[in-house]
Image (cartoon, grey):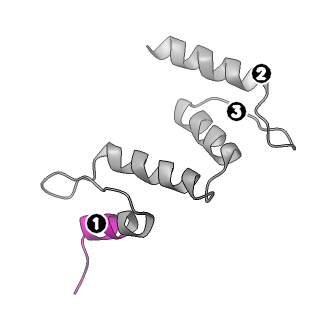
Amino acid sequence: MSETKIDVAVNVGNLLGVNIEYSTGSTVCKNSWNNVLIALVMRDIANKEDVAKAVGTLLGIDVSVSSEGTVPKESWENVYFEIKNRI
């Protein structure tokens, strides 16, 4: 038996202990991805550096992380100005 996208998404949610929301058809709701990301961070599967880079990717901007794992002021400024331009 072949699993649907929803079945697999729900399996991911079950592994992480998070709710996977979906609509009729095969659309997984955005909140499900939020839940997965939060669970990955809470379980230390994703760290601050991973999340900072993901924010940069989502915004299409450069977010650098130092070798010590800190996000420099310039990256925070990039995030600030990009969000400000979008809202």
Residue 31 lies, in percent from the top left, at 33, 44
At 69% from the left and 23% from the top, the residue drawn is 76
Q: CA distance from mark 2 to mark 1?
A: 40 Å
Q: Is residue 8 above or below residue 54?
A: below
Q: Residue furthest bottom?
A: 1
Residue bearing mark 1: 5
Which residue is nearer to you in this view: 28 or 15? 15
Other residues around mark 3 within 10 Å, as few (<14) / some (14–19) / many (≥20): many
Q: Is residue 73 above or below residue 22?
A: above
Residue 7 lies, in percent from the top left, at 26, 70
The type of residue carrying mark 2 is: Lys
Q: Which of the numbered marks, if any, corresponds to residue 73?
A: 2
Q: Residue furthest right?
A: 67
For residue 28, side relative to residue 23 (left or right): right
Residue bearing mark 3: 63
The type of residue carrying mark 1 is: Lys
Other residues around mark 1 within 10 Å, as few (<14) / some (14–19) / many (≥20): few
Q: Are marks 3 and 1 in contact (CB under 8 Å)?
A: no
Quadrant in the picture for the N terminus? bottom left
Q: Residue furthest left?
A: 24
Quadrant in the picture for the C terminus? top left
At 63% from the left and 29% from the top, the residue drawn is 61
Q: Which of the numbered marks, if any, corresponds to residue 75?
A: none
Instruction: Please tell me whether residue 12 belongs to the stretch shown in magenta.
Output: no
Q: Secondary structure of the magenta portion, mostly?
A: helix
At 17% from the left and 51% from the top, the residue drawn is 23
> Tag 1 or tag 2, which sits nearer the N-term?
1
Q: CA distance from mark 2 to mark 3?
A: 10 Å
Residue 73, by quadrant, is top right
